[in-house]
Image: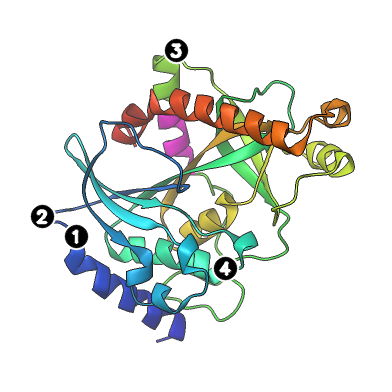
Amino acid sequence: MTEQRKKILQTYKALKPLMPKGFRPHIALITEQYYSLPAEFKTVSSVKLEKLPFYDSLDFKELLGNILFVKLGGKDIIVLKGRMHYYDGFSMRDIAHIIYVFRYLGIEKILSIDEVGHLNPRLKCGEFTLIYDHINLTGDNPLIGENDDELGIRFPDMSNAYDEQLFLKLNSVLLNNKMKISESVYLCTIGPESETEAEARFYREIGSDVVGYSIVPENITAVHARLKFAALSLITRNLVPDKIREDDSSEEEKLKEMLKFRKESVKLLNSVLPKLVKNM
C-alpha cells in the first residue's frame, strides 16, 4: 500500500464514524468558504478539516474548510465548504486528498462550484456558466508521482472529464427553469495575480471561455478516482482583452465590483441549485 493511500484511509476512518446515523451520501458538493447554500439544504452536522488526520499536519490550517453532512429532500449530501487552493501553498496532492476520501465514503458524483473571470463577450458578470471541458496551464497536476492502482489507473482517460450524462442533466434542469444556458471551456492557471491583456488574449485564442484557479485539480483527481464530475462557475470578473485596457478603476473599485457580481451570481445559482442537485 502506498503512503498516499494510507493517509487517505486514515482520514476516511476518522471521518466515517462522524457521519450522522443512517447517512448514505452519493453526491458531494465543493464550494468556496464564502458560499452560502440555499435554505433547502439542511445541515445535520459538520466537521472541521483541521481536526482530521492528514489535515492536522498541514500548514495554513486557518485556510482549511469544513465538511458538512447535509439533507436535501430525500438525498444525503456531503459538502466541502472551503476548498484548498494551490496559490495558498497547498500541494496538488493536498487538494486531491479529499476527493479520494469522498470515494471511500460512497460518493459517486461531484458538483464543484467556483469563481472565474470570463474571456468571452457572450458571457456576463453576475451570471454562472456550466463547464464542459478544460485546459490545464498550471504546469502541475495531482497525479504526478507514484501511482496507486487501487486509487486509479496510471493514465486516466480525460475525454469525458466533465461527465456528459451529468452535464446534460444539469443543462436540462436549467432549460426547464428558463435559465440562461452558458457553456464554457475552463482554463486553469496558478493565480492569484490577475491576468494581463496579452494573457487574456492568448487564453481566448487557444479556445477557453473562462479563467479560474480551482476546479481542474479536483476534476483530474475525480476522473482518476472514477467519479462522475460536473462544475459550475460564478462569473465575477471581465477579462475580455479590449475591456481590460479600458478599465482604469482602482483596486478598491474593482474589488467592490467583483463582490457585487459574486453576490448576484450566487443568488442566481441558488435559485436553481436544489433542483440541479436533486437531478444529478
Task: Label 4: state its secondary structure.
Answer: loop
Q: Which mark is on residue 19? A: 1
**x, y (%) of residue 10?**
32, 78
Between disc 3 and disc 4, the foreground one is: 4
Q: Which mark is on residue 90? A: 4
Q: Is residue 168 left or right of residue 47?
A: right
Between disc 1 and disc 2, the foreground one is: 1
Q: Which mark is on residue 227? A: none
**x, y (%) of residue 210?**
68, 37
**x, y (%) of residue 223?**
49, 57
Residue nearer the viewer, 132 or 264: 264
Between disc 2 and disc 4, the foreground one is: 4
In the rendered image of this protein, does residue 132 appear above or below residue 14? above
Task: Label 1: state its secondary structure.
Answer: loop
Residue ID at (55%, 63%)? 156
Residue that mark 3 sits on: 178
Residue 166 is inside the magenta segment: yes
Which span of residues is magenta-colored? 163-171
| Mark closer to the chain start, 3 or 1 | 1
